[in-house]
Image (cartoon, rainbow, N blue to C red):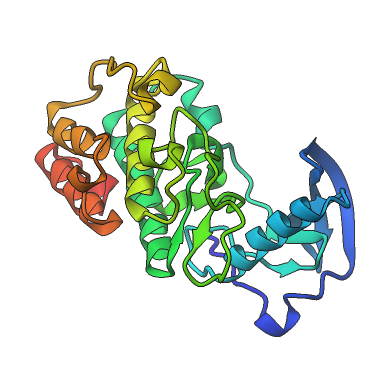
Amino acid sequence: MDCVQQVPDSQLTEARSLEPLRVLAVRGGIQSEVGEWRGREVFVKTLLTDDPQAALRFEHEGQIAAGLDHPLVVPLLARTRAQLIFPFVPGPTLRERVEQGPLSPAEALGVTCGVLGAVTHLHARGVTHHDLKPENVLLAGGSLRGECVRLVDFGMSHSQALPHDIHGGTRMGTPHFMAPEQFQGVRGDPRSDLYSVGVLLFDCLAGHPPYEDALGWLVGLCDDCAPLPGPPELHPILQAALSRDPAERPGSAAEMRAALRGAARALGLEAACP
């Protein structure tokens, strides 16, 4: 497994010798591209706008990414005021894989346990991701094993270590994957991420999220959840994670991962979630 090491902190502000290769997208004043830096292929975010709020959000993302160090989290290699440089991870997103069809229980368990491993690290560092969804989960080499998960994109994240939350009081997030309290503007509650992981597991198993009318669910107008997918051993975990009340969800990412490991053992799929 190719686990990328971070450049030393003393070099985090030195984004030199970057050679652009191809532009992937330009959205919200930020250009995403693949390039070459110090002899390696990298993924680069470049701030294109002079808008002060956009610059603050960009700095916020860089500060949070710089404080993370885990093999299942794509590390920040270097940053300037206008660029964030990460290692390029060859492989599809989880969204691209799920669009091909639902995953098997073993595959869904593997991916979800990997995501929870990354989330456990985030929460230990005082970071709530707030945008966990298949688009932000990369699959290194296309593998669905937990150790090949790579978590990305901290643009909406909350960090207890930062004196100011640039997104405070907002409803930022992806409706199908955001927790009801997050939609109401609550920030920094790790249990919001556990709700999102529950939706992600549901999506992996069913090929779609649980609520067709996501906004109706978030505002409390409807509770029509699709039938729980996958084997019955996973249903109590899904029900708990998808609870509207954060207090009824698993107490931590580690606790949710332990529950999934227990379900995997009951299904004879221990290797999927070691």
Question: Where residue 148 appears, x then y in whole percent?
Answer: 46, 50
Residue 250 in the image, given as x and y percentages of width and height? 21, 49
Camera-side residue of 200 and 271: 200
Residue at (89% x, 68% y) in the render = 17
Q: Closer to the camera, 212 or 181?
A: 181
Q: Which residue is painted at 47% across and 26% down in the image? A: 98
Screen quadrant of the C terminus: bottom left
Asked if residue 103 shows in the view, the reply is: no
Residue drawn at x 87%, y 49% as measured from the top left: 48
The answer to whether residue 208 is left or right of residue 229 is right
Up the image or down, 208 lies above or below 106; here it is: above
Q: How many marks?
A: 0
Q: Residue at x 32, y 29 (%)?
A: 202
Query: In which quadrant of the rendered view does residue 52 lie?
Result: bottom right
Residue 123 in picture, x, y percent from top left: 39, 62
Q: Quadrant of residue 4?
A: bottom right
In the picture shown, does residue 206 fall above or below 7?
A: above
Q: Judge whether 195 appears above or below 150 on screen.
A: above
Residue at the left extreme of this rendering: 266
**Left or right: 72 with respect to 91?**
left
Q: Residue 160: image x %, image y %? A: 47, 68
Asked whether residue 198 is in view, the answer is yes
